[in-house]
Amino acid sequence: MYELILILPAVALIISIFADVLWMSYLQLVISVLIFSTVITIAMTFSNITVFLGSFFFIDYINLVILITVSTLEMFVAFYSFGYVRTEIASGISKRKFKFYYFWKNLFVLSMMISIVSNNLGIYWTGLEATTLATALLVSFNRTKESFEATWKYVIMCSVGIAIGLFAIVVLYFTTSQVYGESLQSLSFVSIMRASSELDKNFLMLAFILALVGFGTKVGFAPMHNWLPDAHSQGPSPVSALLSGVLLNTALLGILRFYQINWAAGIYYPRYFLIGFGFLTIMVSALSIIKQTDYKRLFAFSSMENMGIIALGFGIGGIAIIGSLLQIFFHALNKGLLFLSSGNVLAVTHERKIEKIKNLSNNFPITSLVLLFGVMGISGMPPFAMFLGEIYIMTGVFRSNILLGFLVFILLIFIFIGLFGKVLKMYTGNMDNAERMNELQSEKVTHRGINDNKRKKTEGSVHPFMIYVPLILLLVSSLLLFYVPPQFLNIVKSASYEFQGRIIF
Amino acid sequence: MIMEKIAELFIILILVSVVLNVSSPFLKFAIKLYSFQSLMLAFYIFMGAIHFNSINLYGSFAITVIFKVILIPYFLFKTLKRVKMDKEIDMYIGIPEAVVFAGSLTLLSNLIAQKIIKIGLTFGSFVFTIALATFLIGAMLMITRKTLFSQIIGFLTIDNAIFLAGNSITHGMPLLVELGVLFDLFVSILILSILILNLRRNVAS
C-alpha cells in the first residue's frame, strides 16, 4: 500500500520515455488520480508512524500533510498539463520538446516523493538535490537567454546551498554515530529521535544552523532568495505552480526535521532563528512586491512571503504551528491556481509585463475573475481558505509578542496593496488613446487580418481544461474555509503534537 | 604513527592545490588541479581504510576515484574544448590579493576549528582545519571570479571540502549515501555543462 506512493511515479517516469506525448497526457491523468487516491486512502486509515521498504522510508503526521499537498496539487497540474500540451502544440511547438516535459516532470515528482517520505536523512538529501537537477531543464524550457541565465543561477545557488545542508547532515551523523556507531541507522530519523536526549547539544545546534542556511537557500529565505523569482517565473506555468506550491515545502521539511531533533534534545532556541529568518523574508518580499513589473515574478515573491509566514508560525509554536501546517496545504492550492490562471494569459498574449496587459475582464472573462479572487485568497481575505491558516498564525504571533505582531501585520497590508493594485490594473485598465488610434488605423488597412488577430487574443483559443482547472481549484480553496475534513484536521493536530517532541512510535 | 604522517601529507597537498588554483588563471590547469586534489582525497580515504580496515572506506575510495578523479574532469575537459576558453580574464580582485586572502582564510579556519573541536577526532583537528580552509577558499573562488567555468570549479572545491570534513570527523558517510551524493554531483556537472554550452551559443548569436 505505502510502496505505491513511490512505484506509481516511477512507472509514469518509465512510460514517459517511450510513449507519445498525447498518449502520455491521458496516462498521466490516470496515474495522477491513482497517486491522489492512494494518498487519500493512507490518510483516511492512518493511525501511527509506519516504516516501510526496509526502514528507508516512513510516514508520520508531518510528512503526511506535505504528501497530501503534493498529491492534490499534482493531480490538478496533470489536468492542466493535458490542456497546456494541446494548446502549445497547436500554436506550433514541436511534439519532441514536450516528450521531455513529461519525462522531467515525472522525475521531479518522483524525487520529491522520495525525499518527503525518506526516513534516512542522506536519502532525503539525495532526493532534494535530484529535484534541483530535474527542474533545471524545465526552467530553461523556453530556451531563451533569460531562461538559461535563470537556470544557471538556480542550479549553482541551490547546489551550493544544499552542499551546506550536506555538511549539516555530516555533523549530525558525527553526533549520532557516538550512540549507534557508524551505520545507516545513525542517519535514520526515527532512531535519532529515539536517542535524542543522549546527543551532544553543541553539535546539534551547529547542525541546525547549517541546515537552516543550506536548505533555507532552497526554501528561499531572505538573504539567499535571489534565484527564486527568476527561476519560478521562467518555467512553463504548470511547472511554476509545482515549484512554488510544493517544492519549497519539501525543502522546508528538511529544516523542520532538524528543528524537531533539536526540540526533542531539549534545545529550544532554534525557534528564534526561524522567527528571525521568517520575519526578514516577509519584509524583503513585501518591499520587492511593491516595485515588480512582471506578473509571474510578482507571484513568485508572494510565495516567498508565504514561506516566511510559515517559518514564522513554526518558530512561534503553539497554535501557530497548526496555522502553519494548514497554510502549507492552502498556500499550495492557492498559489497553484494563480500560476495556472496567469499561465493562460501568458499562453495567449506572450507578454510578461504588467503594464502591457489591460482589460482582462473583456478578453478573459473566467480567467481574470479567477486571478482576481485568487489574489484575494493569497493575501488572506475571508471567503478563501488561507484566511484560516493566517488567522491562526497571526493569533499566535500577537499572543507571544504584540510589537512583532503589529510589524508583521503592517507588512501583510503592504503585500496586499502591492498584489491587489497590480492585478486590478490588469483586470480593468483601458487601452491608451494612442494604441486605440493605431488599432483603428490598421483596421482600416487590413480588415480581415486584424479580426483574426483579435479572435486569437482571447480566452477561446486555449483548451477548456486550462480555463476550468483553476476555477475548480478556486472553488475547492473557498470550500475548505467552511468545511475542513475532520480526518485532515486530526492529522494536522497530531503533527503539531509531534513538534513538541511527543512522538508515539 | 607513520600512517598519520602520510595521511597528513595528502591533506597538505589538497590545501596546496587549492591555493595554486587561486593563483592561476588557466582553466585547463584548474581542472587538472581539481583532479589531483580529488586523487589526494581518495588516497586519504585509502589510508583511513587501511588503518581501520573497513570495507565501507574501501568502497568509498573506489567510487571517489571513479567519479571525482576520472569522470567529472573528463566531462569538464570535453566542455572546455567545445567552449574554447583557456584563461580567466574577469576577476573582481587580482591574483596576488586573492592569494593573501586565501592565506588569511586558512588562519581564520584554524581559529574556528580550535574553538569547535574538543572531542578526539580521526586524525586530529588538523584535517578539520584544512577542510574548513578548503571550503572557505572554494567559496572565495566562486565569489571573486566571473566566468561560469570558474564557478563550477569553486563549487567542486566546496564539495571536496565537505567530503574531507565528512571523512575527518567520522569514518566517512554510509556507502549508499555517498554513492547517491556523488551521482547527484556528477549529474549536476553534466547539466551545468549543457547550460554553459547553451549560454555561449546565445551570447555568440
Image (cartoon, rainbow, N blue to C red):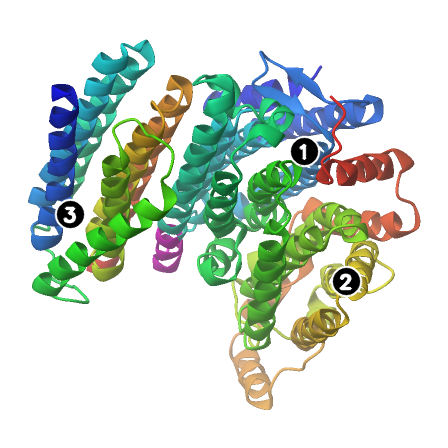
Q: From what the image shows, is residue B38 above or below residue A91? A: above
Whether residue A375 sits left or right of residue B40 in the image: it is: right
Instruction: From the image, tell me which residue sits under label 3.
Output: B83
Tell me the number on the disc at residue B169.
none
**Disc 2: host chain:** A
Amino acid type, residue under disc 1 in the picture: Asn
Whether residue B120 sits left or right of residue B144 in the image: it is: right
State the separation of the CA atoms marked 2 and 1: 27 Å
Q: From what the image shows, is residue B9 above or below residue B28? A: above
Residue B200 visible in the displayed image:
no
Instruction: From the image, tell me which residue sits under label 2.
Output: A400
Residue A274 visible in the displayed image:
yes
Whether residue B121 sits left or right of residue A324 in the image: it is: left
Whether residue A421 sits left or right of residue A402 in the image: it is: left
Instruction: From the image, tell me which residue sits under label 1.
Output: A63
Q: Considering depth in this image, is B143 or B192 the residue closer to the camera?
A: B143
Q: What's the magenta region? A: A144-153
Secondary structure at badge 3 equals helix
Residue found at the very far bottom of the displayed protein: A433
